[in-house]
Amino acid sequence: MTPPAIEVRQVRKTFAIRSGRVVAVDDVSFAIPPGGVLGVVGESGCGKSTLARLILGLLAPDSGEVTVEGQTVGGMDRKARARLIQPVFQDPFSSLNPLARVRDIVAMPLVAQGTFGRAEIERRVDELLARVGLSAEMGRRLPAELSGGQRQRVAIARALVLRPRIVVCDEPTSALDVSVQAQILNLLAELRRDLRLTYLFISHNLAVVEHVASEVAVMYLGRIVERGTTDALFAKPEHPYTKALLASVLTPEPGLGVPDVGLGDALPDPANIPPGCRFHPRCPVAEPRCASERPPLKERAGGGVECWIA
């Protein structure tokens, strides 16, 4: 039986602060099949980027386990892990060495492996630059001489030059103009199809996730509160937080203004997680037991929802 491309089992991660500890990821479990795309959405501070770093092996979980293609991430050799899973980060300028030429940036993972000859490195760099839509002339430039979209193409080429099978995309289009976002999303979709890649796609943009993901997980204060297929979740969300996220999407219709989704002005505090359902202080339909009893996971086809009233 083929193992999942990514499997996360009861993973928890906390960080120390002056007043105690912040729970960034709390008892999260899911699996992504080979070739699948899981979109992870939620407000800033909900734990999305921490989850990405746990899967990449950049952070170690306090408890639980992360595996990629059946291998425990923490127990893998770093070079072997780099050949299997690679990231594309949010800001293409800060993730690129400003003093290195584009060709050298793309070649860096190959050089770090120490097993590729010069001719093979040159061949792969040429191949990836062409695949992501960059000319040979652009390969001689510095990152500052490129546009934001071109820099993100460089970051994608660098991520794929080792031919990994899994890519973790952490807000890869949020720093780009809308028109450029569409180009990068289409490129990522094309690369996934042609190279048979598996994506973990993290974003706060629901329209982007609906476009690229086959499944969606909704995070709130470190937990996945709802997960399902993209079509089902967008057509019929069950968790009140998911409904609020979908209701918050701005429309181009004039005169409608900013939608009121009924969540109030109080933002969630990861250093002071409430008892029971952690969403209950902002939930417009909360019941008395929501304040004291943690809701169980109600399984659904392709996922589940963590809510008493779903």
Image: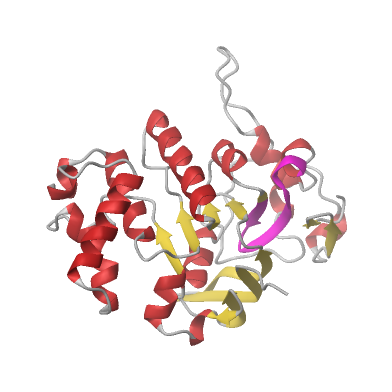
Q: Position of residue 170 (x, y in %)?
A: 46, 55
Determine whether 175 is above or below 157 in the image.
above
Which residue sits at x=41%, y=72%? Answer: 83
Residue 263 visible: no
How many numbered dots are placed on residues in this image?
Answer: 0
* In the image: residue 121, left or right of residue 85: left
Determine whether 73 is above or below 167 in the image.
below
Q: Position of residue 192 (x, y in %)?
A: 51, 51
172 in magenta: no
| Quadrant holding the N terminus | bottom right
Q: Main secondary structure of the magenta part?
A: strand
Q: Position of residue 109 (x, y in %)?
A: 29, 68
Please tell me which residue lies in front, 195 or 252: 195
Q: Position of residue 110 (x, y in %)?
A: 28, 69
Please tell me which residue lies in front, 294 or 310: 310
* In the image: residue 295, left or right of residue 189: right
Colour option used? secondary structure
* In the image: residue 148, left or right of residue 81: left
Determine whether 75 is above or below 43 in the image.
below
* In the image: residue 20, left or right of residue 140: right
Residue 165 visible: yes
Outermost top residue:
254
Region of the chain picked out in magenta, as a range: 216-232
Please tell me which residue lies in front, 254 or 178: 178
Which residue sits at x=67%, y=73%? Answer: 3
Which residue sits at x=76%, y=45%? Answer: 240
Q: Quadrant of residue 307?
A: bottom right
